[in-house]
Image (spheres, rainbow, N blue to C red):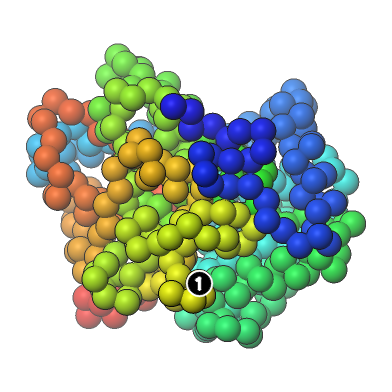
Amino acid sequence: MNYSVDADGYYGDYGGAFIPEMLFPNVDELKTKYREIIERSAFQKEFHHLLKHYVGRPTPLYHARRLSEKIGANIYLKREDLCHTGAHKINNTIGQILLAKHMGKSRIIAETGAGQHGVATAAVCALMGMECVVFMGAVDIKRQAPNVARMKMLGAQVQPATCGSQTLKDATNEAIRDWINHPQETHYIIGSVVGPHPYPDMVSLFQSVISQEVKNQLKSIEGREQPDYLIACVGGGSNAAGLFYHYLNNLEVGIYCVEAAGHGIETDQSAATTKLGKPGIIHGCKTLLMQNTDGQIQEPHSISAGLDYPGIGPLFAHLSDTQRATFRAVKDQDAMRWGLELSKLEGIIPAIETAHALALLETETFKTDDVIVLGCSGRGDKDLETYINYFGL
Ligand SMILES: *Cc1c(COP(=O)(O)O)cnc(C)c1O
């Protein structure tokens, strides 16, 4: 089994680049240059310098003592919530802004749902003095006001997407349209391991710093590089791809992917793509996709904006088909309960996305000496209002 992308941009049956003709030159330029540019020593030096001094890496691998006692296993949290701007997203935006600079681009566009990727993009554009336009659904602009304000403070222009459901997929359509109209000077920073080849591979590469660090940290804490299990939440799959990257071909490491069940996979209010999706094409990529019988995209639902996407990265469609990873779906109510649980047990308020991964711990059986690494993808600051309303705080 091979879990790396092939020369045509496929993971098994999934991936590829299904793009309008007008975008071909942009995507082709990226495809031919990205590996070579990323491997240059000047690129690597600047990337790792910024990860250390700007993002704050390496992030801690924290042994959660009280959580471990409650579950009856050795649980480590990989603290991506401590990254600058509050989540793992910045690992990728740092990488892509450097790539854009090396390709001579002067203008950056991005799409965002909850605003986390938009904020991480706006921050690195400020850092590099580049023009930044972030497309965001008009509905999301209303419900994510603090992140809209952050993007504006960071100098980005926030462009409302007013078509369709006025959420993430519509913002993505607008970003693609803009890219078609400004092919020369613009680089499009996609925020997860989705989109046409080479984005899924490129974003995985930038996020792979997470599992590189876990290997080194586990070695010094536990005396071995490999855990028994890895657990991460999956929206598009970028934090999970980063956490799994260096372990995918090591079959001794068990892998859990946690999707958002929303109100439940038996309802029409869910975002559990591997449970409910069928093969289809979304945003330039062949993957599993929630769709109705006419092949129209089914609106997803999750209480966490970061998991509220009707598709999944092609790597994850492949991990699901090959059963290399075990996929579970966690409901809104269980994720919310675990958001509160981690806060009280460890003094860490997690993002609601992350709380989905935590909720898996009580549904699986582990041995007391199992070593488990759970991706703590982000902090809960952005979700305070949701927590307040849900628990009546
Ligand atoms: C965006 C986000 C996610 C989901 O995106 P992936 O690409 O699946 O990682 C998960 N957690 C947090 C905190 C996020 O901001």
For residue 36, say whether it is visible.
Answer: yes
Q: Can you name the residue that lies furthest to the top here?
A: 223
Residue at 27% x, 19% y: name it.
222
Mark 1 lies within 8 Å of ligand 1 (Cβ measured): no
312, above or below 369, in the image? below
319, above or below 287, in the image? above
- Residue type, numbered disc 1: Gly
For residue 207, say whether it is visible.
Answer: no
Using the image as rendered, state which of residue 164 and residue 111 is in the foreground.
Answer: 164
Q: Which residue is mark 1?
A: 295
What percent of the width, then of the height, locates residue 177? 75, 70
What percent of the width, then of the height, locates residue 166? 56, 81
185, above or below 146, in the image? above
Residue at 37% x, 55% y: name it.
274
The N terminus - image quarter: top left
Q: How many marks?
A: 1
Tell me the quarter of the picture where residue 5 sits: top right
What percent of the width, then of the height, locates residue 248? 42, 30
Under circle 1, the secondary element is loop
Residue at 40% x, 61% y: name it.
277
Q: Can you name the residue that lies furthest to the front here?
A: 294
Residue at 20% x, 63% y: name it.
334
Tell me the quarter of the picture where residue 275 sits: bottom left
Decide if residue 382 is on the left or right side of residue 31. Answer: left
The C terminus - image quarter: bottom left
Using the image as rendered, state which of residue 295 and residue 68 is in the foreground.
Answer: 295
Q: Residues within 10 Å of mark 1 (few under 14, many from 20)?
A: few
What percent of the width, then of the height, locates residue 354? 34, 54
